[in-house]
Each structure stands twice: as structure tokens, then as C-alpha cells.
Amino acid sequence: MDDNKNVYDSVLDLVGNTPLIKLKKITSNCKGSFLAKVEAFNPGHSSKDRIALYIIEQAEKEGVLKPGDTIIETTSGNTGFSIAMMSAIKGYDCILAVSSKSSPDKIDMLKAMGAKVYICPANVAADDPRSYYKVAQRLHEENKGSVYINQYFNSLNGEAHYQSTGPEIWGQTNGKITHLIACSGTGGTISGTAKYLKEQNPNVKVIGVDAYGSVLKKYHETREFDEKEIYPYRIEGLGKNLIPTATDFDLIDEFVKVTDEASAHTAREIATTEGLFVGYTSGAAMQAVKQLNEAGEFKDSDVVVVIFPDHGSRYMSKVYSDKWMNEQGFFDSQNEEAAQTIQY
Ligand code: PMP
């Protein structure tokens, strides 16, 4: 079977090597060329397959992880799905502590892959014993022989992107990339990719996308943790109420903040203009591109790579639900969108 190029040992062989897809209509008013790195093409439908595989295989190499052992993680859903998928294939138990902000669809998907899920309140401080960090830590301590992936504080997170996402983008653009636009959650994607790209060409400009209600942008500018920046917001996977050590702030040139509402509309716009059904943070990243373009950031010769971290199917009860959009008040100014359903 090995000589057949389309037969794989498992889906693990399909992690990474995602396509860069040209954006056309949604960027028609923008200066420059825009390419989306569509991470939904990973078998677990997000960029998190890369870090899950890299960290698990590193632990296996070091002999820390043996079949039958337990893998524990805190996750907004995507990393959990990737770990659950890999645990099913490789024979590990998977325990996930998730935020109550995660989409119900995401949580059901984790359970479908055989994971045990603990749902923890979203709007408590990171050091609160109910927070998903603390719950995961406690489970790790109670569960002898378990491995805690700890993506926010694990340097292997960025290393996974340094080894894969960075070289892929450099090769796919023939070294012509001028800007990288990526959402920052753990910061692993942006930091690892930026490190590789800046080693090839220090002039590549790296722009992080942050949420209103998150501390990252302010921390980048002042190197101070400002609690006043923190308040609830809706986008999952983007921004943070703590400073992750997995983020290398020195490699990020600037941060742009985007709103929940604009990001939701832009995610929907990506689907209807480009035919790409992607997640909420892809909408956030694209929204940042629009704001940067309006601010005069790009010129015609620029080659801008935007990371689209996951697939739209994970947001059917949120961004892609008219009911949810209405409940958030997101249709107030754009009633024509809500009127798309015609009932007979
Ligand atoms: N988008 C989504 C949907 C995510 O789940 C994450 C990860 N939390 C990110 C973006 C940000 O990626 P990173 O953690 O590598 O900064």
C-alpha cells in the first residue's frame, strides 16, 4: 500500500501542509495581495492539530507518554479536539477542561471523539480554583502518570509552528511574504511562525489580532499587566486574561483589536464572498486586515498572509446562527442579513 500516494497510515499523516488560498472579492478594495492559510484543511479542522501532534510525539520520544496514559489539557475546543483525535488513534485517555464560553457544538465534538470534558466558568480569574487552568492542574496532580499539554505555558507550542507553519508559508510565497496577520490566543501560532519568517527576512511585519476585553495589546505596548483591560467578550480562542509565556511579544510588531460584532459579520462575509466556511477568529483576522487597510498599512506590492485558524462548522450555534446573531444585537444595523431566510 505504501507505494500508493493517496493511502495513509492514519489521519496523523495529513496534519499540516495546508493550502494558501488567494482572497479576491473580500479584499477588492484593499491594496496588496492577500493569501489565507486555511487551517481547516487539517484533519482535525484547525491549526491545533500541529501543536497536539508535535507535543504528543515529543512526550512519546522522551518516554513520558506510554499507551494507556492520560493526556490532560485546558482548551477552548480546538486543541481538545486535536488531542482527543490523536488519543483515539494512539490509545490514550483524554481529559479536557473547557471554558463555559465554548460552543455547545465544540463540546459535543470533543465527547464524540471519546474525551472526558469538564466545563468551567469562563468569567473567573485565571487563579480561581474553578478556572479551567486550575481544574486541569488539579486533575493532573491527582492523576499519576498523566501528561499536561499546558499550551499557554509550553514552549513546544510555538516550536510546532516554527517547524511547520513558518516554513510552509515561506515556501508557498517563494519568500515574498511581507506581512503576517494572525490571531493571538496562546500566541503559539504567531510567535513560532514569526520566528521562522523573521529569521528568513527580518522585514516581514508581524501583526497580532486581539479582542476588546483582552490584555495582550496593552501588555505588548507597556509590558504591564493591566487588569482594567479585562472584561467579557464573545470571540473564542482569541485574546487572553493572562500573559501566556507561549507568546514571544518581541516578535510581534503590533497588535490590532477587533470587536465581536465586526468579526462576526466579517466571518459571514468570508463565506459568501470567498466560499470559505471558516471560524469566528478567521473573521477577526480578516476584520483586522480591513482595519489595517483603512489605516493605510498596505501597498500594492505587499504579499499579506492571513491565518484562518479553524472551520465554520464549529460555530453553527453562534456566528452562523441568525438567532444567536439577533440575540447579541448584531443584526440591528444589518437587518438585510437576518432577512435571508424566506419562509413559505
Ligand atoms: N483561533 C482559534 C479558533 C483558536 O482556538 C485559537 C487558539 N486558542 C487561536 C485562534 C489562536 O491561536 P494561538 O493559540 O496559537 O495563538
Image (cartoon, rainbow, N blue to C red):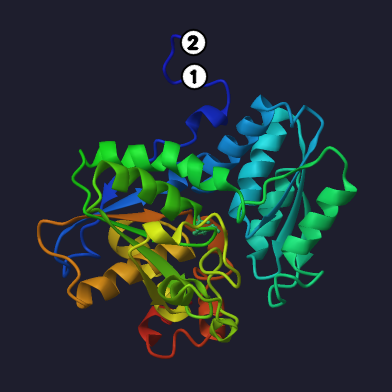
Q: Nearer the viewer, residue 266 or 229?
A: 229
Residue ID at (56%, 43%): 156
Return the residue at label 1: 7
Q: Measured along the vertical axis of the image, is residue 327 above or below residue 49?
A: below
- In the picture, residue 254 is in which quadrant? bottom left
The answer to which of 150 and 53 lies nearer the viewer is: 150
Q: Position of residue 194 (x, y in %)?
A: 36, 51
- Lateral position of residue 170 relative to residue 258, left or right: left
User: What residue is disc 2 on?
Assistant: 2
Badge 1 local density, few (<14 within 10 Å), some, or many (20+)?
few
Q: Position of residue 205 (x, y in %)?
A: 27, 58
Residue found 49% across the figure and 68% down from its top: 320
Sequence-wise, which precedes: disc 1 or disc 2? 2
Q: Which residue is pictured at 17% across the width and 68% down the height?
A: 30
Q: Which residue is situated farthest in the front direction here?
A: 223
Left or right of 154? Residue 176 is left
Q: Amino acid at mark 2?
A: Asp
Residue type at tag 1: Val
